Image (cartoon, rainbow, N blue to C red):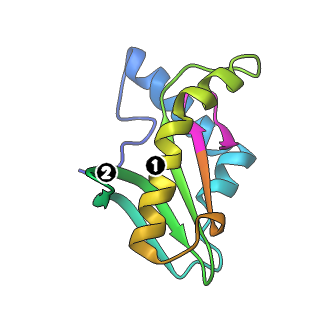
Amino acid sequence: GGIPDRGDLEGGDAQDLAAFFAMLEKPAVHDALKRHGATSLWRERSFMVRESQTLLRGVFDRVVFFQDRAVILDFKTDRVDAASWPEAVERHRPQMEAYRRALAKLSGLGRQAITCQLLFVSSGDVVVV
């Protein structure tokens, strides 16, 4: 059980795992995963809120709460580079805006106090939406 280490897998799985550990060591990823000063942390938290005549449902990958603000971090497996970031961000923007609205309702925070970030696992890049 638990998180595998570099010696647990062989072949392609080992390469994927090595890339994952390398991604975790990138400064932007390290900063995005920090919880210094956090008051609460949600991981893989399902939600459902009413929005007008519809129900908005989803799963927050990670939400870090601070005294007067929160950061939503959504992990994405898209293969992106600097040239394709804008397109990927625009593709995910509606989801992140919906998550922002849902978290505002659930937490009582204003939307302006909620930051949304995409963490592209393949490249280790973190982009604010």
> Against 116, is 87 above or below?
above
Q: Is residue 30 above or below residue 127?
A: below
Horizontal placement of 13 versus 74: left or right?
Answer: left
**14 or 77, nearer to the observer:** 77
Measuring from the top left, give residue 41's x and y in whole percent.
46, 71
Left-right relation of 34 to 102: right
Tell me where residue 5 appears, x and y as whole percent.
42, 42
**Residue under the point 41% across and 15% down:** 12
Q: Would you say the residues marked 2 and 1 are in contact, meaning their CB atoms lie under 8 Å apart?
A: yes
Residue shown at 65%/47% (left/top)?
29
- Residue at image coords 64%, 55%: 32
- Determine whether the residue tagged by mark 2 lies in a helix, strand or loop: strand
* Magenta stretch in the rendered image: 118-129
The quarter of the image holding the C terminus is: top right
Number of marks present in the image shown:
2
The quadrant in which residue 36 appears is bottom right
> What amino acid is at disc 1?
Ala
- Neighbour class for label 1 at 10 Å: few (<14), some, many (≥20)? some
Which residue position is annotated with label 2?
56
Q: Earlier in the sequence, mark 2 or mark 1?
A: 2
Q: Residues within 10 Å of mark 2 (few under 14, many from 20)?
A: some
Return the residue at label 1.
Answer: 98
Look at the numbered disc 1 and give the secondary structure of its residue: helix
Q: Is residue 2 above or below residue 49?
A: above
Q: Which mark is residue 127?
A: none
Spatial CA distance of label 2 from label 1 is 8 Å
- Amino acid at dot 2: Leu
Evaluate whether residue 90 shows in this view: yes
Q: Which x, y percent locates residue 82?
A: 76, 22
Q: From the top left corner, tell me how far across and down residue 110 is, in percent.
A: 58, 71
- Give the quadrant of residue 69: bottom right
